[in-house]
Image (cartoon, rainbow, N blue to C red):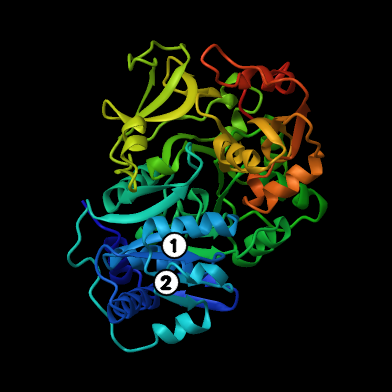
Amino acid sequence: MYTIADPLAHAHRNTPDRLATVCGETRHTYAQLWSRCRRLGAALTAAGIEVGDRVAILADNSHTYIEVYAGVPASGRVVVPLNTRHAEPELLYALEDSGSRILLTDREPGRLADPVERVVRIPDEYEAWIAGGDEIDLGKGIDEETLAGLFYTGGTTGVSKGVMLTHRNLIANTFQWMARVLYDSSDVMLVMAPLFHAAGSNCVLANIWTGGAQVLLPGFTAAAALDLIEAEACTATLGVPTMLAAIAEEQQTRARDTSSLRWVAHGGSPIASEVLRRVHQAIPSAELIEVYGATELSPLATVQRHEEALIDTERVRSCGQPLPGVEVRIAAEDGRALPTGTVGEVTVRAPTVMRGYWGKEEQTASALRDGYYWTGDLGYLDDEGFLFLVDRSKDMIVSGGENVYSTEVEEVLFEHPAVLEAAVFGVPDEKWGEAVWAAVQLREGESVDVETLIRFCRERLGGYKVPKGIDLHAEPLPKSGPGKFLKRKLREPYWEGRDRAVN
């Protein structure tokens, strides 16, 4: 098996003069990318950062991000991509929990400088930092089981969990993806989803293996994405459903030449058939592809190709068949495999399953059982192995492709002195797929309005986790016998008339 140093070396040997990255006016070949990653490794060594040490990055998409994403693990360190949509307390937690020694960032770090030994600002300080002539060998002293990255995702206990992905995990998923969606050196990939997100980083290693170009979009707007597709003759892109919907709307309003697009993929949350229809009408040259997975799966488990041909069929609701080398099983709570057509929890066994959660043995043991990763999604397989999702067993909301665990939001609401009880759940949202919603019972004698509670949350949580609405209840919230909130009962009025409770 390989490490992340191998695709870099392969591209350097075979396509050194081909374009590797396009970022504004800056263009680097694969020979330059190879050199810059080796110089990044040398800079880390000079700074005393040892093999296995964590290096965090908080930044918008750029060629630098590609170098850090590939070069840090290729040099034996562990990359920690931080979500730019997280609030400062969440970012501080990730830095402290991971024990990151260096923070690379394109913004003023503020308090984020406190947990780390050094902050390197992107671009100027970073460029000076790696400008020396020293280059180290990549891939030395590491193997496929070496930890490559810590990817922080929402936590069911109210704090994020660092998903430990090895070189083997990431390389295996790259090969599986390439087996289903063929790449070559003529590909030009628009990277429009943020690189800290699986939808942004999913194709990075595949493009490097094959010597294709990657066009970086620092911050997504539909207009900017379409302008780059036209200007750079992009052949493929991947985003979350809200991005695709915005692109379709913009293209219908002010059309660009998108005939170069070979495929457009989406993941992160289910997509509405009508959105697929609009995307196909707006960009008829592109094959539409749905991907399903989780950060814990490096990230892909299933792929549904040619959705444009399925829009008016029942199978458009499926997220596809397992990738080669991936086993998807539907399981009962006791671990029994369930027969075709029966709803149960989606579990996955593959070489892409994470090592575990950083420093969280109990959560790791709960998620990794009987050799499978238990996703928390409820679904069924049809007689051809196509996976259909119907609900979630975890208290999780997926809004705009981002996971929001309800307990994170509940803990913040409980901090407000007027709140006695709080239950958070997802409701359908036309734009974001699902929106965060809350039900709150106030303490006797207390009074607070919804906007005040929402503002209280906004000061403590990333914007996408803040409730879009809050229902105030005079009576206690409904509970089960053991005292758990009956969230299904709270959700039912919002999901009435729908055939599934995920959106």
Q: Amino acid at mark 1?
A: Gly
Instruction: Please rate how many residues cluster around mark 2, counting C-alpha atoms within 10 Å: few if below 14, some from 14 to 19, many from 20.
Output: some
Q: Quadrant of the C terminus?
A: top right
At x 35% / y 68%, what residue is drawn? 71
Residues at discs 2 and 1 in contact (Cβ within 8 Å): yes
Give the residue number, with chain letter if any, for mark 2.
18
400 displayed left or right of 289: right
Q: Is residue 76 visible?
A: yes
Whole-percent x, y for residue 13 in the image: 28, 70
Q: Quadrant of residue 310?
A: top right
At x 32% / y 66%, what residue is drawn? 8
Q: Determine whether the residue tagged by mark 1 lies in a helix, strand or loop.
A: loop
Q: Quadrant of residue 409?
A: top right
Q: Amino acid at mark 2?
A: Arg
Give the residue number, with chain letter if any, for mark 1.
212
The outermost residue toward the front is 445
Instruction: Please rate how many residues cluster around mark 1, counting C-alpha atoms within 10 Å: few if below 14, some from 14 to 19, many from 20.
Output: many
Q: Is residue 177 above or below residue 230?
A: above
Viewer-proximal residue among 193 and 7: 193
Q: Is residue 84 visible?
A: no
